[in-house]
Image (cartoon, rainbow, N blue to C red):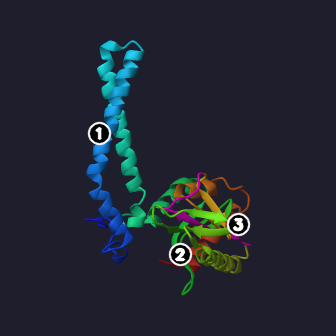
Amino acid sequence: MPGGSIYVQPNEKYTGSSPQWWYEKFWREDAPNRRKYRYVKAGVGFIIGVALGLRFGLAGVSALTGVLAAAAVYGGDWFLDWYSFYRTAVWRGARRGELITGRLLRRTLRRRGYQVLDGRAIRDQASIDHLVIGPGGVWIIDNESWAPDVEIACYVGRLFFGEKYGSKTAKALVDKAEAFAELLTRETGVPVTITPMIAVHCGVLPRNGVVSAEGLTLLRPRTAARLIRSADAGVLNDSQIELLARTAARELQRL
């Protein structure tokens, strides 16, 4: 059923006549057409494989090279088709972005001395999906997804989601970063500046996969972990990291 998953509880946002529901419905209904074109592509691959076999003096096995080429084309086209649908899973409500990002952050950063706290909030105020504290500094990361055709870009210093301004989204997360930094600095005595990020699970990012605008950085979950890992170490020492992590665990409400 479109919009359904055994792993994620049903949400009205992804059912009925939502864009997510229609996207999945049309994708499934178009499967026979995609399969038909895949057969055509595989046929062209077979002809090219046979031609290459004859060209390189493999007349005895040219049929085999054709079959191998057809299989490679068919498999490659199937994978690209599947992957384009798989990348919309968070947007469609079939997977939870915070679980994906949290797992990547812990797997990549913990062995390098970083602490990752998931689902934290200042009581009765701001909440975030991930708080990362380590040698390179402190980050907060939220998870978002947009429709597959929404372009995320920066023009003249301003953030855009398609044709819409992203200033409201940027300001909200920048304000959260400042609120979290103020609390941690006040409670620990360690001067803290927090960098806000959004892990983008669906939407069109530029070729380099990163958009920075209005004090906010938007990027893929894997890129977020890689960018944090590449930050210059030495901003915080081990004792400061431990103090900040213990204070955050004590003072911030767990969601």
Q: Amino acid at mark 2?
A: Arg
Question: For residue 115, what is the image quadrant?
Answer: bottom right
Q: Quadrant of the N terminus?
A: bottom left
| Mark in front: 1 vs 2 | 1
Q: Can residue 140 be seen?
A: no
Q: Quote the CA–CA distance across marks 1 and 3.
A: 46 Å
How far from the left and from the top, in percent, is residue 183? Answer: 66, 80
Residue 105, above or below 243: above
Residue closest to the eye, 46 or 11: 46
Instruction: Assess whether residue 2 is covered by the magenta stretch.
Output: no
Residue closest to the eye, 158 or 55: 55
Q: Which residues are magenta?
A: 191-207
How far from the left and from the top, in percent, is residue 70? Answer: 33, 32
Nearer-N-terminus badge (1/3)? 1
Name the residue that disc number 2 marks: 120
Q: Amino acid at mark 1?
A: Tyr
Give neighbour class at mark 2: few <14, some 14-19, many 20+ (Cα, 10 Å): many
Element under label 1? helix
Question: For residue 190, what is the image quadrant?
Answer: bottom right
How far from the left and from the top, in percent, is residue 164? Answer: 56, 73
How far from the left and from the top, in percent, is residue 131? Answer: 58, 69
Q: Amino acid at mark 3?
A: Val
Residue closest to the eye, 222 or 20: 20
Name the residue that disc number 1 marks: 39
Residue at screen point 53% across, 75% down: 120
Nearer-N-terminus badge (3/2)? 2
The numbered dot on residue 59 is: none
Residue at screen point 32% across, 35% down: 42
Q: Quote the CA–CA distance across marks 1 and 2.
A: 50 Å
Nearer-N-terminus badge (1/2)? 1
Give neighbour class at mark 1: few <14, some 14-19, many 20+ (Cα, 10 Å): some
Name the residue that disc number 3 marks: 156
